[in-house]
Amino acid sequence: MDITTNQQRKTSKGRQKIEIMKVEKINSRYVTFSKRKNGIFRKATELSTLCGADVAVILFSEHGKVFSFGNPDVDEVLDRYIAEIEEIDNNCNLLESSSSSSATETEQEQEYKKSLNRLAEMKKAVDVIRNETDRKNNGEFWWNLPIHNKEKEELEGYKESLEELKKNVLTKIDEMASHNASGETRIINQFIEGQNDGLEAGFNFEY
């Protein structure tokens, strides 16, 4: 074995941890945001498909633009989440009213209250997102909204969303066509079998 090669292998530092820092170039930052956003949405889709989980992901861009993904639907998942928050909040109020005022709060109770406060803040954020989205869309489908005032990162995400929508529509059309074709084939086969049965019954000779 070559000694020089062996020494070079020993001096290798191996895989180095890459420091996560904000991308300075604006164009590169747009591209990075778009790619990472789609990656997160893709992972959320995989999680939902593989594990049967209901997923909602909400992202705000650097300029405050909101992007969301949900399966089966963002609003449905958020409604369930908010309902859970309200139930926990009601249980907490019952717990507080029944507890003694002289009792000292345990560390667990303090952490529980902190969690409730965080959940309440998230609930407010969800309401803001939903109201802002409804205000901007005015009840229209997102693909019918004007795009002349959108920024580059939004247009890139818009294009990718349209491509994804087109792919999903084509996939659904293929599935429906395949299903209809199999149904038609089944009907034809049943018809042929029925005709064959009739022929066999009509020409049943005894030997």
Image: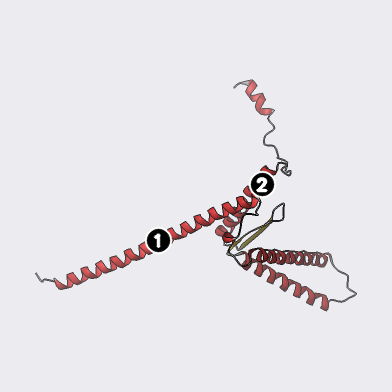
The vertical placement of 118 against 93, above or below, is above
Q: What residue is shown with label 2?
A: 30
Q: Which mark is residue 206?
A: none
Q: Amino acid at mark 1?
A: Ala
Residue located farthest toward the left when viewing the structure as drawn: 207
* Side of 77 relative to 119 (left or right): left
Q: Is residue 54 visible?
A: yes
Q: Secondary structure at mark 1?
A: helix
The number of discs equals: 2
**In front here: 136 or 8?**
136
Q: Quadrant of the C terminus?
A: bottom left
> 2 and 170: which one is in front?
170
**Where is residue 93 shown, x and y percent of the image?**
79, 75
Q: In front: mark 1 or mark 2?
A: 2
Under tag 2, what secondary structure?
helix
Q: Is residue 173 left or right of residue 165?
A: left
Instruction: Find residue 173 and report its horizontal and vertical position in percent.
Output: 44, 60
From the image, tell me which residue sits under label 1.
177
Image-quadrant location for residue 56: bottom right
Against 19, residue 145 (above or below) is below
